[in-house]
Amino acid sequence: MSKKQYTYKHTTYACYRGYATQAIINNLTPLLFIVFQTSFHISYDRLGQLILINFSTQLLTDIWASKYADHYGYRKCMVAAHALCTVGLLSLSFLPQLLPSPYLGLVISVILYATGGGLVEVIVSPIVEALPNDNKESAMALLHSFYCWGQMIVVLISTIVLRLIGRDLWFLLPLLWSLFPLYNAFKFLHVPLLPLVQDGNGMKLKELLTSPGFYLSMLLMICAGSSELSMSQWSSLFAEKGLQVPKLVGDMLGPGVFALFMAIGRTIYGYYGERLPMKGCLIGSSILCVLTYLATVLTSNPFLSLLACSLTGLSVCLMWPGTFSLSSAAFPKGGTLMFGILAICGDLGCSIGPWAAGILSNRIQETGQSFPVLMGRGFDLEQLGLRTGLLACTIFPVLMFLGLLAFRKKKSAKA
């Protein structure tokens, strides 16, 4: 097929696959942790460091892409991003077995594909935002739903394949998944792309940082990331400890159902969002998020607690893409720089929320004292600590709600 035969629909599909690629690189390696631990005798502490390396690399790439992506162009960056993801997954198959230190092979692989993932995260949203579309908010929500669908598909297919081929042939998994970004890299060589803003017309960093409204956007992104990850990172433990089920079942009932609700919510808004104002939906989402957090931590019935935990996925589904859409409408010349800064803020929120919950949880387990509302409910120390940490993280959807009210009032005043 020649370049002229490609349309903006092909561009949209390539962007969908781009977010699915990010789901592959973020979720495949953790599924293989038990294999790495038994095959290469790598400690859980060092395996946990791989997650930190992945996050840190993506964050540094976000910073780089915010400044230089426009200079090199969307096409070169997206092709390079998918090439790095492909090489990273291929090296994950072979380097740990070829190098004297298997862990070094894992670190190199993570850095390679995380660099590609960071580029995808910053660039794919402005590409979709720049495409001709009657309802950009719906398009953004639908785009972000493909990360959730991708996450579930990666977990499901990888679990089944690993069960069929056995752990000794684990290296076939990243080898097979590497074909996906490789295919998409060739697609991005041909699909038509549009600049979000014309060369030289985009806002400079100083302009963005001197706009008070942009700090609201940054706050909303931090709250969006924290609200989502604080709950999803602990949902597996809720299922395992509360329902007394194996880890595999806990992962499916916890993060699996959480991601399913996120995917459903984003997909529904993607198709019917033109009837629903994004600002109103985000305010409603913030309120629902507060309620699901409270229901999760205050309910002693494990099934109801897990249900509320899963419904949090629905309540946070629009926060990330919705903040992108509101910010793009408020700062139409923000360009890739704006999307990059917001992605950095979102990643910071994804780190701050779970970290704060974990720190507070450990503290409560040491002292045995928590908020009065949680005391005397029959929770053991582990459950008391976890629920206390999540109760404290309710501050993030509350701040999201207040920030949205201020954002709305500011826009009304301008009008």
Image (cartoon, rainbow, N blue to C red):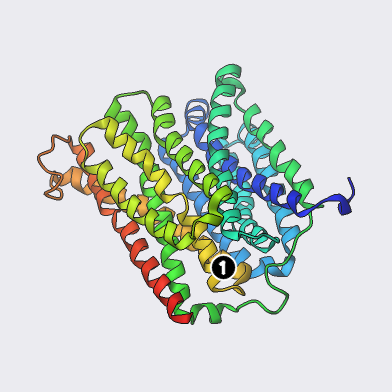
Q: Measuring from the top left, give residue 1's x and y in whole percent.
A: 88, 45
User: Crowdedness of circle 1 by 10 Å Cα count: few (<14), some, many (20+)?
Assistant: many
Q: Is residue 414 left or right of residue 333?
A: left
Q: Measuring from the top left, give residue 353's x and y in whole percent.
A: 36, 53
Q: Is residue 402 left or right of residue 111?
A: left
Q: State the residue at coordinates (68%, 72%).
A: 197
Q: On screen, 267 above or below 57?
A: above
Q: On screen, 127 above or below 148?
A: below
Q: State the residue at coordinates (31%, 53%).
A: 356
Q: On screen, 233 above or below 158?
A: below
Q: Quadrant of residue 410?
A: bottom left
Which of these two is toward me, 98 or 64?
A: 64
Q: State the residue at coordinates (67%, 50%).
A: 15
Q: Measuring from the top left, give residue 338's x and y in whole percent.
A: 56, 69
Q: Measuring from the top left, give residue 143's x and y in whole percent.
A: 60, 50
Q: Amino acid at mark 1?
A: Ser
- According to the image, label 1 marks what residue? 328
Q: Is residue 122 left or right of residue 351?
A: right
Q: Quadrant of residue 168?
A: top right
Q: Mark yes or no: residue 19 visible.
A: yes
Q: Is residue 318 left or right of residue 380?
A: right
